[in-house]
Image: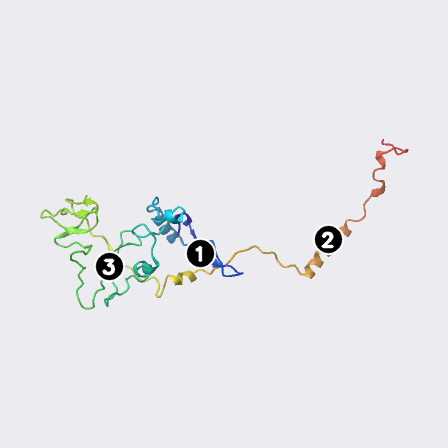
C-alpha cells in the first residue's frame, strides 16, 4: 500500500478486476473504510521513515514510498511472507520448523499493540520456565548479574558497581555503557487473531463491486402518461386573448405605413 493512499478513516486499496468483455485485467483504486483504532495504527506506521523510499523505486518509477517495507528497505517476498510475517501476526506464534513446536511471539507491550521483541518456546506443563539465554540469544529479562541497557534496551552484564558494562551496537559503542540499568520492559504474548486466516483469504474480506451511474428503464406506459400530462397542461392554459394575426396592428397607420 502506498503511503499516499492511507487517509483518516479509510485507505485506498488498488486491486485487479477482470473486464466483463474478456480476460483483460483493469487496475482499480477503491476506498475501504477502517475503524478509528486501525486508522491510528496506519497513520503511525505511515509516519515512520516518511522520507525513505523502497530500494527498487528507480526500476518501477513512482514515489517509492510505501507503508510496509521489509527490514532491508525492499518489498516483502511472497515466498516467505506468510511464514515470517503473516502467520506470527495472526497466530501469535511462528510456524513449527525442524520438528520443534512453534515459538511464541514475545512482544514489548510498552506501547499498544506491542512490538515483537523475541521468539520463545512455549512453556512445558509441570516444568519451571526459564527465558532462553546463551550466546546469540537476545536477553529481555534482567538477572542477578545482568541489567537492561537504557539506550539499546537489551539485557547485558553488569559491572561490579552495578552499572552497565561497556558493549557495542552497530556502528560503534553503545551510549548506555556505564549507565544505571533501566527497568525491564513489560512483555506479553500475542493471542491468535483468527484461526485459519491466510493472505489469500483476505482477498475475500470485502465484496468487489463496480459502481456505475445508470438510467431507470422507461416503459411504454410511463412514456404515455408523460405525454398525457403534457397535453392536459396545454389544454388548461386556454385560448389566447388576442389573435396573433392582428397583434402587430398598433405599429402601423390606416395606410399600412409604420406609425
Query: Mark on residue 119?
Result: 3
Query: Mark on residue 139?
Result: none
Task: Tell me the element at label 2.
Answer: helix
Q: Quadrant of the C terminus?
A: top right
**Nearer to the camera, 190 or 174:** 174
Where is mark 1, residue-wise? 15
Of badges 2 and 3, nearer the viewer stands 3
Task: Tell me the element at label 1.
Answer: strand
Seen at 42% across and 49% down, the residue is: 5
Mark closer to the chain start, 1 or 2: 1
Mark closer to the chain start, 1 or 3: 1
Seen at 67% across and 61% down, the residue is: 219
Residue 145 appears anywhere in the view:
yes
To which quarter of the image does residue 201 belong? bottom left
Where is mark 2, residue-wise? 230
| Distance between mark 1 and mark 2 Cα atoms | 49 Å
| Distance between mark 1 and mark 3 Cα atoms | 34 Å
Amino acid at each position: 500500500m502506498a503511503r499516499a493512499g492511507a487517509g483518516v478513516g479509510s485507505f485506498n486499496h488498488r486491486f485487479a478486476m477482470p473486464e466483463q468483455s474478456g480476460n483483460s485485467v483493469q487496475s482499480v483504486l477503491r476506498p475501504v473504510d477502517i475503524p478509528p483504532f486501525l486508522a491510528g495504527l496506519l497513520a503511525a506506521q505511515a509516519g515512520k521513515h516518511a522520507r525513505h523510499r523502497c530500494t527498487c523505486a528507480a526500476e518501477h518509477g513512482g514515489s517509492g514510498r510505501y507503508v510496509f517495507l521489509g527490514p532491508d528497505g525492499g518489498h516483502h517476498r511472497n515466498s516467505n511472507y506468510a511464514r515470517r510475517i503473516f502467520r506470527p501476526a495472526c497466530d501469535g506464534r511462528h510456524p513449527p520448523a525442524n520438528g520443534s513446536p512453534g515459538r511464541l511471539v514475545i512482544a514489548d507491550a510498552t506501547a499498544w499493540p506491542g512490538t515483537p521483541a523475541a521468539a520463545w518456546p512455549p512453556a512445558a506443563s509441570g516444568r519451571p520456565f526459564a527465558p532462553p539465554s546463551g550466546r546469540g540469544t537476545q536477553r529481555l529479562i534482567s538477572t542477578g548479574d545482568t541489567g537492561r541497557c537504557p539506550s539499546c534496551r537489551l539485557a547485558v552484564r553488569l559491572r561490579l558497581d552495578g552499572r552497565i558494562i561497556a558493549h557495542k551496537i552497530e556502528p560503534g559503542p553503545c551510549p548506555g555503557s556505564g549507565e544505571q540499568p533501566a527497568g525491564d520492559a513489560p512483555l506479553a504474548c500475542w493471542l491468535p487473531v483468527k484461526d485459519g486466516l491466510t493472505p489469500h483469504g483476505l482477498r475475500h474480506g470485502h465484496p468487489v463491486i463496480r459502481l456505475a451511474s445508470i438510467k431507470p428503464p422507461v416503459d411504454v406506459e410511463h412514456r404515455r402518461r408523460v405525454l398525457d400530462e403534457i397535453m392536459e397542461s396545454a389544454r388548461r392554459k386556454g385560448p389566447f386573448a388576442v389573435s396573433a394575426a392582428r397583434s402587430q396592428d398598433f405599429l402601423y397607420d390606416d395606410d399600412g405605413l409604420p406609425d
